[in-house]
Image: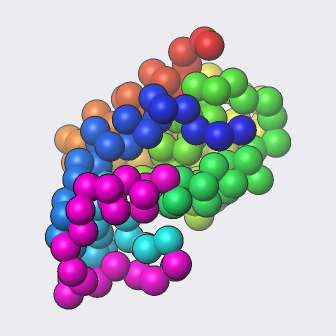
Amino acid sequence: MVSSKGVIELIKTSEGFSAKPYLCPAGVATIGYGSTLYPDGTHVTMSDPVIDLDTGEAMLLETLKSYESAVAKAVTVPLNQNQFDALVDFAYNAGAGNLRSSTLLKKLNAGDYAGAADEFGKWVKGGGKTLPGLVKRREAERKLFTTAV
């Protein structure tokens, strides 16, 4: 399964675009549409050069592949496109490791889709603080996850 254009737009809207490196609320060097790594696996640093919009989009699309793979490997129950997209967006933002160790995934793999949907809202902190942007993003993911295709 691959991500829909809708989830790519959700990521772009949620992350915004930055041509130059910045520190995200968790203190991690980030560039483009929320990328912390370049396609070759190199970590973004604060001294990296500016990138253009096309480079940022290419980075997003390349990075997305690893999150699609992570979701596909972690989930053992059937997913519709919206559920897959919501999980890819979650993993893109929170990290594949956090998805793998989450109660969200445990509930989902136990067949508790409603319980899994309720877990999105627990992932709203960045740098130890509740962030309004994460609250909004998790609400969007939950809505997407629970929307029939």
Q: How is the image coloured?
A: rainbow
Image point 45% across, 83% down: which residue? 42
Query: Height in image: 10 above or below 26?
Result: above
Query: Can you tell which quarter of the image residue 133 is in?
Result: top left
Q: Is residue 146 magenta?
A: no
Image point 52% across, 59% down: which residue? 62
Instruction: State whether residue 38 appears in this view.
Output: yes
Query: Height in image: 114 above or below 19?
Result: above
> Which stretch appears magenta?
40-61
Instruction: State whether residue 126 appears in this view.
Output: no
Query: Height in image: 60 above or below 80?
Result: below
Image point 42% across, 62% down: which residue? 59
Instruction: Pick out the residue farthest to the bottom.
Output: 47
Query: Can you tell which quarter of the image residue 121 is in?
Result: top left
The front one of 138 and 122 is 138
Residue 140 as seen in the image, left or right of residue 106: left
Q: Position of residue 10 (x, y in %)?
A: 37, 35
Residue 31 as seen in the image, left or right of residue 97: left
Image point 60% across, 55% down: which residue? 65
